[in-house]
Image (spheres, rainbow, N blue to C red):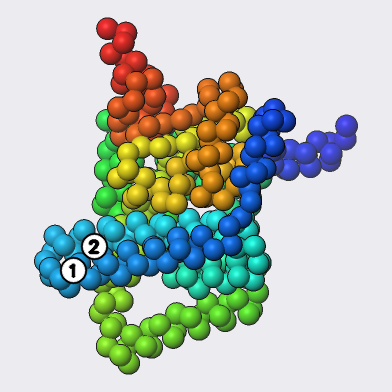
Amino acid sequence: MSVATSRLEAEVPQELEKYRFASEIRSQIRELQKRNNWYNFFAIGLDWLIIAAAIGLYYFKPAVWVYLISIVIIGSRMRGLDIMMHESSHNMLFKNRNLNKWVACLFAAFPIMISYRAYIKGHMTHHKYLWSDIDPDKIRYKIVGLDNPNISRTQFFLRHCLKPLTLAHVPRYLTGMVKVTMVPKDETPFDTVVRAVYWVAIIVCSIIFGFWLELIMFWAVPFLTTLQILKYWAEMAEHAGLENDKELFATRNSFGNRFERILLHPHRNSYHLVHHLFPAVPHYSIKKAHLVLMQDSEYQKAHHCTGFFLSLAPGFSSVIDDIQGRIPFWNKLKGR
């Protein structure tokens, strides 16, 4: 082998080792990959309805504590729109490609300042080269120190659970976002113009019709605060601490309680391992896919967490314990 060939191979990112499920399981999964061409109108509409209700809640009871609750709710639904855009990137929103793209652009991607085309490019790289040096998630983990989670539990809790509440990570997050998804190099001129006109129209209308303050209070503020906090925790839960060369063990499912799922993992994004193994399964079928995959003994050994900070299910880790490779709380009790 020549030096040039060796150097070229070293520069090409390596894909993770794939796990092959039994044909019976794959056949059942294929049945779950069928798309419903109407469900996501409801899913996206519900996100927007909840946002409207959160705004209405504040006007019903105008108080600081109500406003804080409102922006947490809005931030969680912005996260929901983020997940809907993610579904669209896999052509899972609608069967019609134009509908799949433009519903996602107008009602999910553009509202949270993201270039649809740039998002797809980055996300496909993440799937194909997970945990390689060009994986956007790994790059982001390095920026905030999640590439090395083997510190004391107290340090980890302070740095990655409490510190995000101070928004200290937001400038770095947004700087990367501006470079990659807000001012992308490979976006078509048409898409750039549509995205620019979209926000210019909203801002101009807010000034003409006098809702510019509401736009700041109920969109800019939650976008810059609660959304960024929830994204930090949610993205940490997906892969942090799982760097290895096997696809089956490089991602985790993090079920958690209902409150955690609503805030961090809307639209069943908690089944993140299932998504990486079978990205063509739409979100409304992904829980069924998980139950099918549980027939496989190796899949049963993968990373399945039942709480973010603390797992109350015997034998299961919390996300925090799993990231740090610690013994689950209930297993410690058994050992006494």
Disc 1 crowd rating (10 Å Cα; few below 14, some 14-19, many 20+) is some
Mark toward the start of the polypeptide (1 vs 2):
1
Q: Quadrant of residue 4?
A: top right
Left or right: 45, with 282 as reference point: left
Mark 2 residue type: Ser
Residue 70, numbered circle = 2
Total numbered labels: 2
Quarter of the figure that contains the C terminus: top left
In percent of width and height, residue 174 lies at 42, 61
What residue occupies the far bottom of the structure in this picture? 208
Q: Which residue is tagged 1?
A: 58
Q: Going 26% across and 65% down the picture, which residue do you hit?
A: 54
Residue 112, numbered circle = none
Left or right: 249, with 18 as reference point: left
* Element marked by disc 1: helix
Quarter of the figure that contains the N terminus: top right
Q: Going 56% across and 80% down the picture, which residue do you hit?
A: 194
Q: Are marks 1 and 2 in contact (CB under 8 Å)?
A: yes
Is residue 146 visible from the viewing direction of this image?
no
Mark 1 residue type: Tyr
* Element marked by disc 2: helix
Q: Is residue 15 above or below residue 114?
A: above
In percent of width and height, residue 240 lies at 46, 37
Q: Going 29% across and 74% down the picture, which residue do you hit?
A: 216
Q: Is residue 12 above or below residue 248?
A: below
